[in-house]
Image (spheres, rainbow, N blue to C red):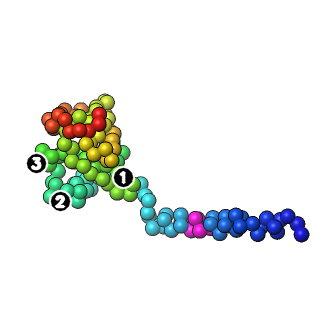
């Protein structure tokens, strides 16, 4: 016997030969079903719907959508500010409760909430970044957020 048939019976080779087609089949199915797509906020209507779904009854009167569509700042008539950010195939949200974790760098506004697990997000808000940074200074000065 030659070494080639012995190599083909190796359990690792058999596992690879069976796993590779299975992986390719799952990847094809994911693409076919449209899962794992590039989730972005594309309109104010979509941003309003996301804000209302995050907090029932939250009706934004002012919105700032990140240029790449990965996040939104929304303010309601009561003055509450909601931060929405992309998190995998969904959007996560937090109400901002202070301005301690907010930094402005030209058109970019970096926000950290008092919830450390939410993390920090940097939004490209263009000319609106300075306006939002100034308005967020009116929030409570010490929220416990990490700067």
Does the magenta-highlighted stretch encompass residue 99? no
Magenta: main secondary structure equals: helix
State the residue at coordinates (49%, 64%).
31
Q: Which residues are magenta?
A: 21-25
Q: Position of residue 119 (x, y in %)?
A: 33, 44
Q: Which residue is mark 2?
A: 56
**Marks 3 and 2: which is nearer the front?**
2
**On the rendered image, what quadrant is the C terminus found in?**
top left
Between 82 and 7, the one lying in front of the other is 7
Q: Residues within 10 Å of mark 3 (few under 14, many from 20)?
A: few
Q: CA distance from mark 3 to mark 2?
A: 14 Å
Q: Which residue is mark 3?
A: 77
Against 33, residue 132 (above or below) is: above
Q: Are marks 1 and 3 in contact (CB under 8 Å)?
A: no
> Where does residue 23 sit, x and y in percent of width and height?
58, 65
Residue beneath disc 1: 87
Q: Mark 3 or mark 2, which has the lower sequence index?
A: 2
Res. 134 visible in picture: yes
Query: Residue, x 16% and y 55% (percent of image)?
Result: 58
Q: Is residue 103 left or right of residue 7?
A: left
Q: Is residue 41 above or below residue 124?
A: below
């Amino acid at each position: 016997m030659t070494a080639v048939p012995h190599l083909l019976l190796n359990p690792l080779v058999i596992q690879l030969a069976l796993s590779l087609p299975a992986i390719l089949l799952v990847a094809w199915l994911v693409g076919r079903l449209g899962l794992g797509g590039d989730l972005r906020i594309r309109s104010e209507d979509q941003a309003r719907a996301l804000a209302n779904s995050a907090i029932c009854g939250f009706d934004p009167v002012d919105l700032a959508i990140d240029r790449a569509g990965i996040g939104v700042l929304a303010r309601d008539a009561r003055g509450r500010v909601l931060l929405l950010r992309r998190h995998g195939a969904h959007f996560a949200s937090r109400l901002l409760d202070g301005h301690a974790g907010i930094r402005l760098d030209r058109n970019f506004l970096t926000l950290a909430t008092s919830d450390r697990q939410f993390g920090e997000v940097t939004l490209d808000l263009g000319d609106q970044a300075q306006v939002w940074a100034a308005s967020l200074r009116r929030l409570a000065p010490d929220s416990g957020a990490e700067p």
